[in-house]
Image (cartoon, rainbow, N blue to C red):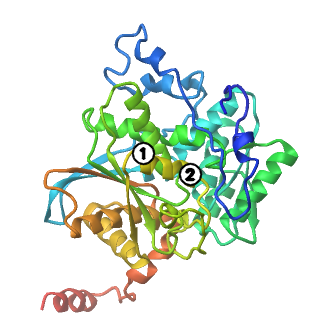
């Protein structure tokens, strides 16, 4: 169905009426704009320079003044033709969204949800999260003077839990999985009337995440890349990347969709595994990449539809490949990414080693979160030496033996 965007909207009531536990929900809504009116706007310079404020017609907001007073988005896009002196043979672009205020991509969604709530006089926003979305929402609400309630699996990384508490949110650790936390937050929404930020539940989250596509297009000189590697768990970031380019397609600003690669951890492949099945079947997740560890991808149907419609690609990477990629990324670029983000880099490396990336092609990797979010995960790949005595003998022993 179609619904006017003047009140809180979640799943389509008609489509979601038959949703069952353990299965991806149906009825996730997609924001549609009056593309014809936008494209023939009296402002003839609309999108000519593609500045940030010109995208307001493609955002579900009355104005940009309702956004948090934090620098969300406009993150760097670093360009490489070689890594640690190894020539790549193609152009690599790293989109570093760890430079958002709470150090993750999720700030894009939280900023839009918080701004919409501010414009509609809503004080309390609730979310379920493995950590990043929760800390992101808590941070946005802190600067906006709003209250936040965050349900998290009790096993979430301590750094992420610390962020949530430091931003002043009411945190509710759940003795269970992310899916359990999600269910609890939806129940709380129904019982207490809180505004819910959950991904694949609140359609505005996709509208926030799509802004990365606008930025990539502008930062690449108003061109689209050949491939974009996207870390994928529940499929919302993937859908957001698609939605941004789809908006540009519908406005005639671009002529084709880039190839978007969904990268999943081998320990949590529930989206990739079900793209060719008639009935969804979930396998319990076990991966070091907690941000993309999902048993039931909540945005499965939209993500799958995008992959089929625009001929997307998929690749899976092991935890070992993720950790190796994390180390290589850090040591060759100075960018320390959490495992979920390093998974996208690992997916690109897998394509590279298979010879799939054409010479001269332009390939973007989304780095969605800081490595400091979950520094415990890389401990198996690092070794801090034992302390030495503060004397000349120690210096000689360290450096002369090293160069022998």
As drawn, the residue found furthest toward the right would be 191
Q: Quadrant of residue 217?
A: top left
Q: Nearer the viewer, residue 5 or 101?
A: 5
**Residue plotted at (40% across, 69% down):** 316
* Residue ID for mark 1: 309
Is residue 26 something that shows in the picture? yes
Q: Quadrant of residue 154?
A: bottom right
Q: Nearer the viewer, residue 367 or 98?
A: 367
**Residue plotted at (34% across, 45% down):** 76
Rate crowding at label 2 as few (under 14), some (14 to 19) or many (20 or more) other CA atoms within 10 Å. many
**Residue plotted at (34% across, 65% down):** 347
Residue 294: image x %, image y %? 58, 65
Tell me the number on the disc at residue 301.
2
Is residue 100 something that shows in the picture? no
Residue 313: image x %, image y %? 36, 57
Considering the numbered disc 1 on the image, is that residue within a helix, a strand or a loop? Answer: helix
In the displayed structure, would residue 188 be above or below residue 85? above
State the separation of the CA atoms marked 2 and 1: 12 Å
In the displayed structure, would residue 217 be above or below residue 300? above
Q: Nearer the viewer, residue 216 or 27?
A: 27
């Amino acid at each position: 169905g179609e619904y006017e965007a003047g009140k809180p909207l979640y799943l389509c009531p008609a489509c979601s009426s038959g949703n069952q536990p353990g299965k991806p929900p149906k009825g996730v809504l997609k924001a549609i704009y009056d593309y014809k009116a936008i494209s023939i706007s009296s402002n003839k310079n609309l999108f000519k320079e593609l500045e940030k404020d010109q995208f307001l017609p493609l955002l579900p907001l009355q104005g940009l003044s309702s956004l948090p007073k934090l620098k969300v988005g406009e993150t760097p896009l670093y360009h490489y033709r070689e890594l640690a002196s190894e020539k790549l043979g193609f152009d690599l672009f790293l989109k570093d969204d760890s430079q958002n205020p709470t150090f993750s991509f999720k700030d894009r969604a939280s900023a839009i949800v918080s701004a919409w709530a501010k414009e509609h006089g809503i004080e309390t926003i609730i979310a379920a999260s493995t950590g990043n979305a929760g800390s992101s929402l808590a941070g946005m609400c802190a600067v906006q003077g709003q209250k936040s309630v965050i349900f998290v699996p009790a096993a979430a990384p301590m750094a992420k839990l610390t962020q949530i508490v430091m931003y002043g949110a009411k945190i509710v650790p759940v003795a269970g999985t992310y899916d359990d936390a999600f269910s609890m937050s939806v129940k709380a929404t129904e019982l207490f009337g809180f505004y819910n930020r959950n991904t694949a539940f609140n359609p505005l989250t996709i509208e926030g995440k799509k802004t990365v596509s606008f930025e990539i297009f502008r930062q690449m000189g108003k061109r689209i890349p050949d491939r974009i590697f996207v870390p994928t768990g529940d499929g919302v970031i993937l859908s957001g990347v698609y939605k941004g380019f789809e908006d540009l397609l519908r406005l005639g600003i671009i002529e084709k969709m880039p190839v978007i690669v969904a990268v999943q951890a081998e320990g949590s492949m529930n989206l990739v595994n079900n793209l060719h099945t008639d009935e969804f079947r979930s396998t319990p997740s076990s991966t070091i990449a907690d941000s993309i560890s999902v048993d039931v991808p909540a945005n499965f149907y939209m993500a799958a539809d995008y992959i089929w419609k625009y001929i997307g690609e998929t690749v899976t990477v092991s935890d070992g490949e993720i950790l190796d990629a994390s180390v290589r990324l850090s040591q060759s670029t100075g960018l320390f990414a959490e495992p979920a983000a390093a998974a996208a880099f690992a997916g690109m490396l897998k394509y590279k080693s298979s010879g799939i990336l054409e010479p001269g092609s332009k390939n973007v990797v989304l780095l969605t979160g800081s490595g400091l979010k979950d520094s415990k995960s890389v401990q198996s790949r690092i070794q801090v030496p034992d302390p030495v005595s503060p004397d000349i003998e120690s210096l000689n022993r360290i450096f002369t033996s090293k160069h022998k």
